[in-house]
Amino acid sequence: MKQMLKNYFCFIVTGFITFIPTRIDGDFNKMTERKELRNKHLQGNLVKSMTTETNIECFRQCTKLTQCSAMSYNKQNKICYMYSRLNTYSDVTAEDGRMYYLKDVNNCLTEEGYSYKSSVMLCIKFYNVKVIYHDAVSTCQSQNTSLVKIDSQEKQNVLYSYLVVDEQFNAGHIYLQGNRVPNTSEWVFDDGTPITYLPWNLGQPEAYDQMYLCALAQDKGMWHDCVGTQLFGFVCERNLF
């Protein structure tokens, strides 16, 4: 009887260890599985990769890295990937057994007017104060944020979805992060990274002296190049990781 109970206990423990839960808990962090991404192979900004026996160890390693905001684990090949950002919008191919997890966040301060979209890990706040571009930048920086960086179709869709439901923004421009390289057709973010995703509205961009990015809800949120001295609303983005 004792042997039977021992075997039964071992079975339960083994099953618990090998089961991969929807939510993984750590000392102070949690990660939630993106079930819709199962068995896909996605690109991301890779921080670290390793081979490990369980997704729990993958999670523990991710929590040690402040820049790790997402991870994937394949129980078949036991490879763990840790990302600073998971680019769910590009280069999706099949990979049986892979699962993806995102860190839960508690620093997107909704009580201060921020909105969080977990699918793109985007924490943003809309400002209806009409200012020039540089004042928009300064306001964001004073809140330890930056003008919103739109670098994918998914983020563009999120931005537009907020614009069209808010009466303050559905008939006017807003400033976005982005500057034209002087006398060229190239655009860069504040850190100098080239902007490769550019959803221009019809007839845009217009002129080399229009150096900044803005968007218009009436044009389905598509982008315009702007002089920067116009008085527009703007959107700030909080860095979560």
Image: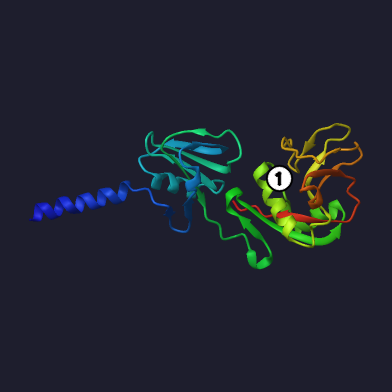
- Determine the secondary structure under disc 1: loop
Category of crowding for the residue at label 1, using alpha-carbon neighbours closer than 10 angstroms: few (below 14), some (14–19), many (at least 20): many
Q: Nearer the viewer, residue 62 or 129?
A: 129
Query: On the image, numbered disc 1 is attached to which residue?
Result: 150
Q: Report which quarter residue 73 is drawn in.
A: top left
| Residue 48 in view in this figure | yes
Outermost residue toward the bottom in this view: 111
Number of disc labels: 1
Q: Report x, y in % for residue 158.
A: 67, 51
Left or right of 169 on screen, residue 63: left
| Residue 144 in view in this figure | no
Q: Report x, y in % for residue 103.
A: 52, 52
Q: Which residue: 74% across, 37% down?
A: 195
Left or right of 158 on screen, residue 2: left
Q: Nearer the viewer, residue 157 or 236?
A: 157
Tell me the quarter of the image containing the N terminus.
bottom left
Q: Which residue: 86% across, 60% down?
A: 130
Q: Nearer the viewer, residue 17 or 38?
A: 38
Image: 167 above or below 6: below
Q: Which residue: 60% across, 60% down?
A: 107
Q: Report x, y in % for residue 31.
A: 48, 52
Left or right of 98 on screen, residue 158: right
Q: Report x, y in % for residue 54.
A: 37, 43
The amino acid on which the numbered mark 1 sits, given as a three-letter code, is Ile
Outermost residue toward the left in this view: 1
Image: 144 above or below 91: below
